[in-house]
Image (cartoon, rainbow, N blue to C red):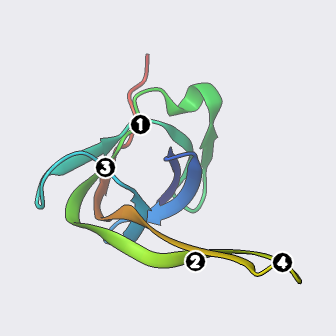
Amino acid sequence: MFAVIRTGGKQYRVAKDDVIVVEKLAGKEGATVTFKDVVMSSDGKVVKLGKDLAGVTVTGKLVKTEKGDKVVVFKKRRRNTYRRRRGHRQEESRVQITAIGAGKKE
């Protein structure tokens, strides 16, 4: 069984016991995270979309929050002795998926 969730402006395909790296989430290590914005769910035979996803949630455990790789921004104007170098490290969270909810019939 797998699901597609949306968090941090991106979509991720997840299954049980997957570890994904997402934008920083609030909480401490070991905290439980619930993703309610599920875009799609499938058990290998039946695909659920739209209204069929009512109540489907994906839960996970927050493994670690850390800074990602450095992104270097380098500006230069040729023949003008103009150079600027800036670096940035975005904070990100590692989440281990523990369960994918089955959904409730309404």
Q: Considering only order in the chain, which callout, 1 or 4, is on the residue closer to the N terminus?
A: 1
Where is mark 2, residue-wise?
A: 72
Disc nearest the viewer among 4 and 3: 4
Compared to residue 1, the image places residue 54 above or below, namely above
Look at the picture and state if 29 lies above or below 18.
above
Residue with the mark numbered 4: 80
* Residue for badge 1: 56
Q: Amino acid at mark 4?
A: Asn
Q: Residues within 10 Å of mark 4 (few under 14, many from 20)?
A: few
Image location of residue 5, percent across then percent down: 50, 49
| Side (left or right) of 32 relative to 19 | left
Type of residue at label 2?
Answer: Val
**Which is nearer the N-term, disc 2 or disc 1?**
1
* Numbered disc 3: secondary structure: loop
| 3D distance between C-alphas at marks 2 and 1 | 40 Å
Residue occupying the point 35% across, 54% down: 24
Instruction: Give the residue displayed 33% in from the left and 70% down from the top.
Output: 67
Q: Secondary structure at mark 4?
A: loop
- Left-right relation of 87 to 26: right
Alpha carbon separation for disc pair 3 and 2: 24 Å
Circle 2 Cα neighbour tier, 10 Å, few/some/many (<14 / 14–19 / ≥20) = few
Viewer-proximal residue, 7 or 72? 72
Q: Which mark lies nearer to you, 3 or 1? A: 3
Q: Mark 3 — residue? A: 25
Instruction: Give the mark nearer the N terminus: 3 vs 1.
Output: 3
Camera-side mark, 2 or 1: 2
